[in-house]
Structures are given as structure tokens and as C-alpha cells.
Image (cartoon, helix red, strand yellow):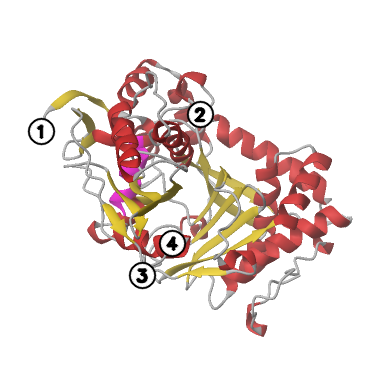
Amino acid sequence: MNVERTGPVTHGQLSVLRSLESYGTTGQAVANLVSIWDIPAGASVAHAADAWQQLVTAHESLRTVYSTGHERPAQSVLAPRAASVPAVEVPDATHGATRDLAATWAAEPLDIRQGPPWRAFVAVHRGAPLYLVTVIHHIAADNTALHILREQFERLAMGEVLGPQEQPVDLALAQLEDGDDSRAVRHWSRHWDGFSPEDRQEGDVSVRRRATLHSVEGLRAAGHVSRRAGVSLQTVVLAVGAVALARVRRRDRITFGLMAANRLDERWSSLVSSLNQCVPLSVRVDEEAAPDDFLRTTYQTSMNAYLYGCFDVDVLKRDLNESGRRETDPTFFSSHYNFLGPGDGEPPLDSPLRTGCVWRASTQRIGPNFHLAVAVESGILIGVGASVDFLPGDLPAVLAASIEGGLVALADEPPESLRELRLAPCRDIGRSSSSRVPN
């Protein structure tokens, strides 16, 4: 391999690596992130392939390999070389047909020790270019980085030129000199006690699956509640999701692994890499609280968690164990919440998301037992992933629809207390009588 330079890994990269260690050799494909980008009108297959080649040249994360055999992982940036971006015929010119093919390409893990940490092809129908499809390892890009790549791809495909880009090795070196991460480690070391066994419920190897819905009315309602309560929109959805999950699980507190984006520093805000880290956020669901007071409390708690969202997970693990608290994986929490920000616009015309809940089947038996993922664009996209043991039957779809219903109820006429908040789904999702969210 022709190596340009080497360096330590960033805190975000290390967090991805440590999290994947618990997935075993058969679970590594969970890190594959799929993107389907429209090819601009007038651009050819060659234009699309060349645009991707320029992105690989510009962003070192797309040509980086990782050494994990030592105590401390390292990254090596390879010199640019010709990128393989074949044109692949799809059976019809629909987004759905391309999604099916992309899923096949994403089924096999990417080898980040040998590289490259991606696969890509141009989807064509009868020779006409439709989409650039990429499968990128999560260590090379998080959700924000994917949006950056998409915007740059569109510009490059139309003949524009990119300027210099910030690179992960430089961030890693800057983090070695920055003392703020040690402050975050001290914070979590002081506040790590108090999790219940269910917060860290490992060993659930039942099949995971996901139900997703798209709601224009839900986004309108969440925005109204956000403005009224003076909290962020992502907090509104998180709080309603916590109430719904607490009622299903019959708990008065839910701890989420909160995805911290860690892009507040302007220098690194447009970096193509994974800056995400998972931090714990415990939401106490006080059914006697006024809804807006509950929202504000959840907002303050989440902002505090985000404040300490960038740290060295190996140092935190060491500190916890040295203080007598046995910790094997500080990145693991049974329930996750991930606010993805802007989505990819309206669902395609052929997408069933336009009319109801969509299920994604999976053979995966690892990862969080519950995952609430939210994106916004023309509407709000609510995805509830869960293991069969954690949410049996059609409960993932019920929970997603109940969150939508709760948002609408809060916007229309907020009750005096959470106990009076009804989470009745606004749509028919084929519920069974045994899968109702307690109200």
C-alpha cells in the first residue's frame, strides 16, 4: 500500500471501532451506510464516476485504512488511486429498484484494514444514468458527512471544483493537544453510577427490525410545540418517544444512548469522517409533570449531555475500572436516540412511506435493543428499530405511530399533566389488540 501519512484515530473513529468490537465478525455490516444520490440533469455516467473520484481524492477518510491490532488503533491515509465505480443496470427506473440493489451491495462488510472503506456504482436504466449509490463505512462518514458528500457530488458532477478540505488526522492531532476531552471524561466518571440493569441490557440476540413512517402533520406539530415550549425540535420528539417507551416498558425512567454530533467547532463542522459519540441521557418520565415543564427539563438534561459529548472512550473505560466500576463498553446502551437532521426530501413517488408504516426486515441480532431515529425535511421521518424480545409483535410500528400521535396531541391542546397525554396513533397500522401503547 502506498501510504501518504499516518496518525492516531480521532475520538469519533475510536468510538466506532470500540462499538464494532462487540458486534463480532458476523455483525460488521451494520456499519455500512447506504446513500442514493440523484445524478444531476445533463450529467453522464462518466461525470458521476469522475465526481466520486474527486471526492475520494479530496477526503482522506475515503482512502484511509486502520490498524487495530495494537493497544491504540491508528489510521493510515493511502495515496489517491483510480476509483472503481461501475455502471450497473437496474430492472426499472425507480428508486425502489435501486434501493433493492443497494441493499445487496451493503450486505457484505467493508474491510477497513485493507480499504477502501466504501463501495460505489452508478445505477443506470437502458444506459441512462439515474443515481450514484454509495456504501460507506461509518468510520469514514457520519450522517452529516454524508450530506456534505452529497452536496459536493452534485457540484462536482456539474463541473465545479472543490477547495482544500479539513482531514481526520489533523483533528486527531488537535484532540491530543486539547484538554477539553479530559474534562468530559471526568464528568462521565462522576455521573456513571445510577444506571439500572435494563439500561445496559446486553445479551439480547433476538432479531432486530425497523418500522418507519413519514408525517407532514407530525413535523408541523413538533415545530409548534418546540416554539411554544422554547426547546429544540429534536428534544420534543425525544421526550414524546421517552413517554411512549416508558409506558410500553412500564418504567418511569428511560436511559438513551444519545448520539452527539460533535460539530460545534467551525473548523471541523464540514469534516468528512465520523465525529459521532454515544453519551448517556436519562429521561425521568414524571406523569404528574406539566408537558411543557417536562420538555424543558429534558432539553436541559440533553444539552448538558451534548456538552460532554467528545471524549476518549478508552480513557473513560480505564478510569471507570480503576475506580472499581466494572465497565466493558462505555459506548453500549440498550436504547439509542439519533436525531439525523435534514433527510433526503419527500419520499419517492413509489415509496409506501407516503401512505403508512414501512417495515425493514433484518437478520441482525446485535446492537441496541431499541433505536429511535428521526429525520426532518418536508415531513418528519420517525424510525423505530427494536429487537423482537424488546418490542414483540407490531410494537415498533405502534410506537412510531404513537409518537406521531403524541406530537399532534401536544400541539392541539396540551393536557395539564403527562398522565393525560394520549398517544393514540393517527393512522391505521394494522395493530393487534395485544400491541397497544398504554395510555
* Number of other residues with Cα within 10 Å of mark 1, as a class: few under 14, some 14 to 19, many 20 or more: few
Percent position of residue 328, x then y? 34, 48
**Which numbered disc flags the more N-terminal residue, 1 or 3?**
1
What amino acid is labelled 2 in the image? Arg
Closer to viewer: mark 4 or mark 3: 4
Lower sequence index among marks 4 and 2: 4
Reading the image, the residue beneath label 3 is 363
Location of residue 297 in the rendering, given as x and y in whole percent from the top left corner: 73, 41
- Above or below residue 125? Residue 191 is above
Instruction: Please tell me which of labels 1 and 4 falls first in the chain.
Output: 1
Q: Main secondary structure of the magenta part?
A: helix
Amino acid type at circle 3 is Thr
Q: Which numbered marker is on residue 93? A: 4
Q: Which mark is residue 1?
A: 1
The front one of 335 and 159 is 159
- Disc on res. 272: none
Marks 1 and 2: in contact by CB < 8 Å?
A: no
Of helix, strand and loop, which one carries label 3? loop
Residue corresponding to mark 2: 263
Q: Earlier in the sequence, mark 2 or mark 1?
A: 1
